Image: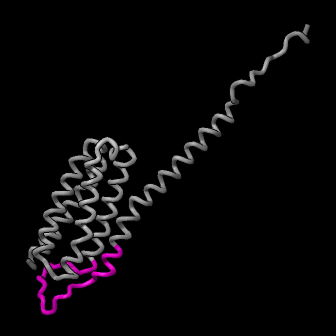
Amino acid sequence: MDNNLRHRVNTDRPTPTSTNTTKDRKKMAMAKKGLRSLAVAIGVPLSLGFMVTYYFPTLNQPGLKTPSWYPPLWTLHFGWLVSHFIMGLSSWLIWVEGGYHKNPQALTAYAIQLFLGLMWAPLMFGFGAPKIALVDLVALLLAMLAFFKHSSGVNPIAADLVKPCFLWVGFVSLVTFNYA
């Protein structure tokens, strides 16, 4: 009688360990893809910022007086790099949510603000044109405002990351206005 009662094994369904392994592999692949995209989103603006810092490190205007409250030049360059890092992180958060597919204006606003942010140092330091650099900063603030508006509906954290960049560009605008 014991020979007739056997447990049937269903070979059609995967075992729990093989399912978990497949899910774990998919999660690991997605995590690696996410880390690569994060590295690109932060690395590209930082690399461009380092290039601008390297090629336009000082003012080329002899005899230009700086006010007493004017920060050391390295702090301006460092502040821009931090701003580029934060904006890169913010853009990545929008990308992860699929925001650029839903709202392509956010990507356009990000690209414009990145370009305008990178142009300030060449205009101010390379060409010695503080009035044009000030116009660049006003346009940058408008582009950042557009990015903030478009990103707030997609990812509120990404929008909140833009706020310190507003403060930074406002401070740099005061510094630039002093020379204009």
- Most extreme residue toward the bottom is 63
Q: Is residue 137 left or right of residue 87?
A: left
- Whether residue 90 sits left or right of residue 150 in the image: it is right
Give the magenta part as a residue range: 50-74
In which quadrant of the rendered image does the N terminus lie? Answer: top right
Residue 75 highlighted magenta (yes or no): no
Is 70 included in the stretch rendered in magenta? Answer: yes
Residue 174 placement: quadrant: bottom left
Q: How many marks?
A: 0
Tell which of 15 and 142 is nearer to you. 142
Q: Residue 65 in the image: x percent, y percent?
A: 11, 87
- In this rendering, the answer to whether 5 lies above or below 123 is above
Q: Position of residue 66 (x, y in %)?
A: 13, 84
Quadrant of the image occupied by residue 75: bottom left
Q: Residue 52: horizontal and vertical position, in percent?
A: 31, 76
Main SS of the magenta part reads loop
| Residue drawn where x is 19% and y is 52% of the image | 146
For residue 48, which quarter of the picture? Answer: bottom left
Relative to the observer, which residue lies in front, 104 or 158?
104
Q: For the C terminus, give its image quadrant.
A: bottom left
Horizontal and vertical percent for residue 126?
22, 82
- Does 122 appear above or below 163? below
Colour scheme used in the picture?
A: one colour
Residue drawn at (27%, 81%) of the image: 56
In the picture, measured across the screen, residue 137 lies left or right of residue 114, that is left
Q: Is residue 43 above or below residue 17?
A: below
User: Furthest-top residue in view?
Assistant: 1
Q: Is residue 17 above or below residue 157?
A: above
